[in-house]
Image (tube, rainbow, N blue to C red):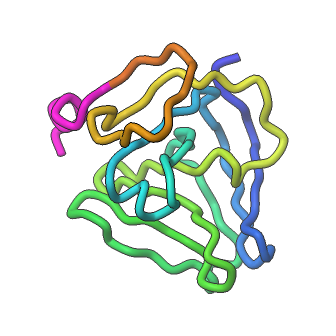
């Protein structure tokens, strides 16, 4: 399976619900300083594409963390909801936010050169440095 269809999720307090048309089955870890500061550790996330809808939008607050992306969270409970790429309207979402998706493959890590030495994943993954990420995505 390369993706899941019709996936739902919600924040801790239930003030925000999300419905995603298609979710990739590949989980990635981001070790950049912003992601680690945002969540206290690496962001484990899945690509949710552009077909994402929210209910409870009045509870969503966003923060423009760079020129190319913003981060969204529930203003009631603080749950991290998404990393949104402005140019192509793509949503990257924390994998723990979504319900009833199993059989995921942890297959890539980005900003691997920014990962602190106090943790490590044992999975064999495709790893990209900060420079490689920016070269690939033109950010």
Q: Quadrant of the N terminus?
A: top right
Q: Residue at x 33, y 48 (%)?
A: 32
Residue 91 position, x and y percent, is: 49, 51
Q: Residue furthest front?
A: 118
Residue drawn at x 41%, y 55% as measured from the top left? 35
Q: Is the C terminus in the top left, top right, bottom left or bottom right quadrant?
A: top left
Relative horizontal placement of residue 136, taking residue 81 as reference (left or right): left
Residue range (magenta) = 128-139
Residue at 70% x, 54% y: name it: 97
| Residue occupying the point 57% across, 78% down | 60
Which quadrant of the figure has residue 25? top right
**Residue 53 point in image, percent of width and height:** 63, 61
x, y (%) of residue 23? 63, 37
Any magenta on residue 134? yes
Q: Nearer the viewer, residue 109 or 15?
A: 109
The image shows residue 16, relative to residue 33, as above or below, that is below
In front here: 107 or 61? 107
| Magenta residue check for 125 | no
- Horizontal relation, residue 136 to residue 43: left or right: left
Q: How many marks on residues?
A: 0
Residue 107: percent from left, percent from top: 52, 21
Q: Quadrant of residue 56?
A: bottom right
Q: Is residue 73 above or below residue 124?
A: below
Predominant SS of the magenta segment: helix
Which corner quadrant of the image does residue 16 belong to?
bottom right
Question: In the displayed structure, does residue 121 sit left or right of residue 101?
Answer: left
Residue at the outermost right position: 100
Residue 68 in the image: above or below residue 46: below
| Image side of residue 50 versus residue 98, left or right | left
């Amino acid at each position: 399976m390369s993706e899941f269809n019709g996936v739902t999720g919600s924040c801790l307090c239930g003030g925000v619900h999300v419905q995603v048309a298609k979710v990739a089955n590949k989980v990635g870890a981001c070790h950049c300083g912003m992601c680690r500061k945002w969540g206290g550790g690496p962001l484990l996330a899945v690509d949710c594409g552009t077909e994402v809808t929210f209910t409870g939008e009045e509870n969503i607050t966003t923060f423009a963390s760079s020129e190319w992306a913003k981060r969204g969270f529930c203003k009631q409970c603080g749950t991290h909801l998404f990393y949104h790429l402005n140019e192509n309207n793509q949503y990257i979402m924390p994998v723990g936010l979504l319900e009833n998706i199993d059989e995921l493959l942890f297959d890539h890590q980005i900003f691997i050169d920014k990962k602190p030495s106090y943790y490590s994943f044992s999975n064999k993954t495709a790893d990209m440095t900060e420079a490689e990420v920016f070269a690939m995505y033109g950010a």
